[in-house]
Image: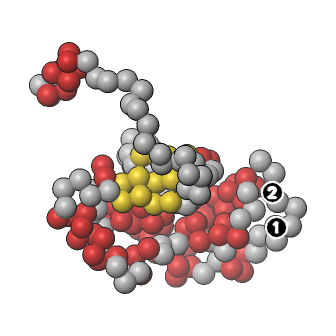
Amino acid sequence: MAQHPLSLPLDETLYKAEEFTFVKEETGICDADALKNHILTVQRKAYALRGFPCIRLFDFAKTKMSVLPAYEEVLKLGREREGAILLDLGCCCGTDIRKVARDGFPMGNLLASDVVADYWNMGHELFLSTPETFPVVFLLGDALDPGFLEPHTPLATPSAEVTDSHHRR
């Protein structure tokens, strides 16, 4: 995908080291210059896909959800209500969903979604993770499309044999 022709050029002066504590903690990259280079590398790749302002302004690598007034209530809900699900729509690289997981929301109850699948993959690059080390389900799609989260019949129903072997584990 080509960058939108009206996108502004990237500007390194918009990088503010104090805004990336979470990336530093998650990656273990403690050297300030190495961390900056790492984030700038991911930014360039993400911006080449789509010249979204959130990429240019480094929002893809900042935590935003955790400063919202209801954040502690969301975490409490995840701890106390069995089966509670949190869906992060427009997750980009998954920074907020990673913060929610680190702060105690059950990882198996988290879902992330974006219109650009490669942003999710770049999240693994940004945070030095893999789908195995950060196994949150990613849903590719447009949340503004009425059919995106529409209920569907399951593609397959597990057989009794598969179900029984699952319960024996």
In the image, which disc is placed on residue 7? 1
User: In x, y percent, where is residue 81?
Assistant: 19, 61
Question: Which image quadrant for residue 7?
Answer: bottom right
Residue 107 appears in the picture as rendered: no
Location of the C terminus (image quadrant):
top left
Does residue 45 sit above or below 100 in this rendering?
above
Q: Residues within 10 Å of mark 2 (few under 14, many from 20)?
A: some
List x then y, in percent, for residue 83: 23, 53
Q: Tell me the quarter of the picture where residue 65 sits.
A: bottom left
Q: Residue at x 60, y 61 (%)?
A: 38
| Marks 2 and 1 close (CB-CB < 8 Å) | yes
Name the residue that disc number 2 marks: 3
The amino acid type found where label 2 is placed reads: Gln
In the image as oriented, which residue stretches furthest toward the left? 168
The secondary structure type at the circle numbered 2 is: loop
Residue nearer the viewer, 83 or 18: 83
Q: Helix, strand, or loop for circle 1?
A: loop
Work out how far the residue at label 2 is from the one at label 1, CA to CA, in angstroms: 7 Å
Dot 1 crowding, Cα within 10 Å, few <14, some 14–19, many 20+: few
Residue appearing at x 41%, y 81% in the figure: 68
Q: Is residue 138 above or below residue 29?
A: above
Q: Determine whether 22 is above or below 50 in the image.
A: below
Q: Residue furthest right?
A: 5
